[in-house]
Amino acid sequence: MTIDATGRRSQPELAYPESHLRRLADELAARYDGVFNRETVERYVLESYAALLRTASVKAHLATRTMYFATERLTALAQAEGALPVIWPEVLFVCEQNSGRSQMAAVLTEALSGGRVHVRSAGSMPAHELNPAVVEAMTEIGLDLSREFPKPLTDDVVRAADVVVTMGCGDACPIYAGKRYQDWELQDPQGQPVEIVRGIRDEVEQHVRDLLKSLEVAPE
């Protein structure tokens, strides 16, 4: 038994419920060589897979999503612990299902900042898939959400954030000293027609523009 980067005890041999998870762990262990030990990478892959499996309606994209989610979490952990540099302001958007408001905010921030703000999004109770009306409303303004998916809120992404923006997720988001917190009061697009969702989208965009101004990033 060894001690990993977070101080937890981890078993040297782990059981993989899916054969592809070992390959994912091999790839990420090579990518983060010198940053995290093998046991930490394995644990993050398995935890990320298990978290996404709980809300997956179909498993067709689960391997790709596990790779993305585990990579995002490992990068956040490395940044929070100073093992990787932070180049751009880090913003985390959190809503309940991570299928509407937080996804819109993340994609709009990425687009309007021209990539000069690094964004993550998460949900306190993530849905199975994105809200179709949200996808439609964003597609109308030329923003593609086809690669996005709901992700559960984890401690590591909160630790890595400079600004945490919450949108109706209650007390689920952990509080860390030194972080900026904002709460945006926005209507929940769940169950709403696309006509209503367009208005929510436009309100989110105005909030994003105000956030970028506060970060001294000129919107494109």
Image (tube, rainbow, N blue to C red):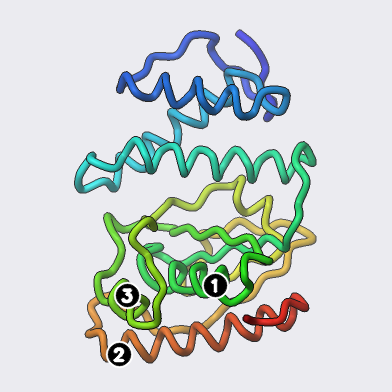
Q: Image height check: is 70 above or below 114?
A: above
Which of the two labelled residues, at mark 1 and mark 2, occupies the earlier sequence position? Answer: 1
Dividing the picture into quadrants, the one containing residue 117 is: bottom right
Q: Quadrant of the N terminus?
A: top right
Q: What distance separates the C-alpha of mark 3 from that of mark 2?
A: 10 Å
For label 3, the residue is 134
Looking at the image, which residue is at 26% across and 76% down? 133
Mark 2 secondary-structure assignment: helix
For label 1, the residue is 111
Asked if the residues shown at circle 1 and circle 2 are in contact, with their CB atoms under 8 angstroms apart, the answer is no
Q: Is residue 45 left or right of residue 56?
A: right
Which of the two labelled residues, at mark 1 and mark 3, occupies the earlier sequence position? Answer: 1
Q: Residues within 10 Å of mark 1 (few under 14, many from 20)?
A: some
Looking at the image, which residue is at 40% across and 38% down? 66
Q: Residues within 10 Å of mark 3 (few under 14, many from 20)?
A: many
Mark 1 secondary-structure assignment: helix
Q: What distance separates the C-alpha of mark 1 from that of mark 2?
A: 22 Å
Mark 3 secondary-structure assignment: helix
Q: Estimate the x, y position of residue 12 in percent, counting from the top left.
A: 54, 9
Q: Estimate the x, y position of residue 185 in percent, counting from the top left.
A: 50, 84
Looking at the image, which residue is at 70% across and 39% down? 78
For label 2, the residue is 196
- Say what amino acid the circle numbered 3 marks: Val
